[in-house]
Amino acid sequence: MIVEDPSLTDPYVADVMRRMDPKVRETLTPMQVSAVAKAISPEAAKKNAVHLRGVIPLYFVRYYFVFVAARDKTAVAQRLEEQRRARTGRRKAILFFLLVSSPVLLTLFVLAYLLKSALGWDFFGDYHLYDVFR
């Protein structure tokens, strides 16, 4: 049996308490029921300076509205996000540089090798690069 408590007038809290296992619910003291109801009530989550909800009943439909106003606390989150993006941007720049410079460096290496071979310079005696690929 649900103990009558002013916090149980909230439909959400009453539904949660009703769905609770009856054996467990019966073991709760009125203080425990009140504590659980306060913890799960939507009012407990309100941390806004202004929080206004309402319903406008019209002939065939009902419209609800919510007005919330509070201090902007997003500056810290935005700063952290900008720092994360900056780190990611640096990583992308390094990766892009490596991907672009690798083919360029490989091409320069091949051209230098061909120039060395054309001039007849032999740095390692009778050992040549094409010997590696045979």
Image (spheres, rainbow, N blue to C red):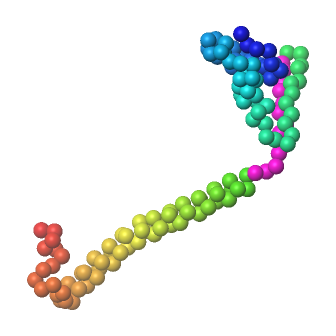
- Residue 133 lies left or right of residue 83; in this view the side is left
Q: Quick check: 84 above or below 134?
A: above
Q: Position of residue 27 (x, y in %)?
A: 65, 15
Instruction: Give whichever of 113, 35 is nearer the camera.
Output: 35
Q: Which of the 4 image quarters holds residue 58?
A: top right
In the rendering, at what x and y percent does residue 8 appear? Answer: 78, 19
Q: Main secondary structure of the magenta part?
A: strand
- In which quadrant of the rendered view does residue 133 lie? bottom left
Q: From the viewer's perspective, is 5 left or right of 94?
A: right
Front in this rendered view, residue 51 or 22: 22
Front residue of 24 and 7? 24
Residue range corresponding to the magenta coloring: 61-73
Q: Write the residue at 38% across / 73% down.
A: 104
- Location of the N terminus (image quadrant): top right
Residue 37 against residue 80 in the figure, above or below:
above
Percent position of residue 117, x then y: 20, 84
Above or below residue 41? Residue 49 is below
Which residue is pictured at 73% across the width and 27% down the height?
Answer: 35
Tally of marks? 0
Q: Is residue 37 visible?
A: no
Quadrant position of the C terminus in the picture: bottom left
Question: Could you tell me which residue is drawn at 25 percent across and 81 percent down?
Answer: 113
- Eyeballing the image, is 16 above or below 117? above
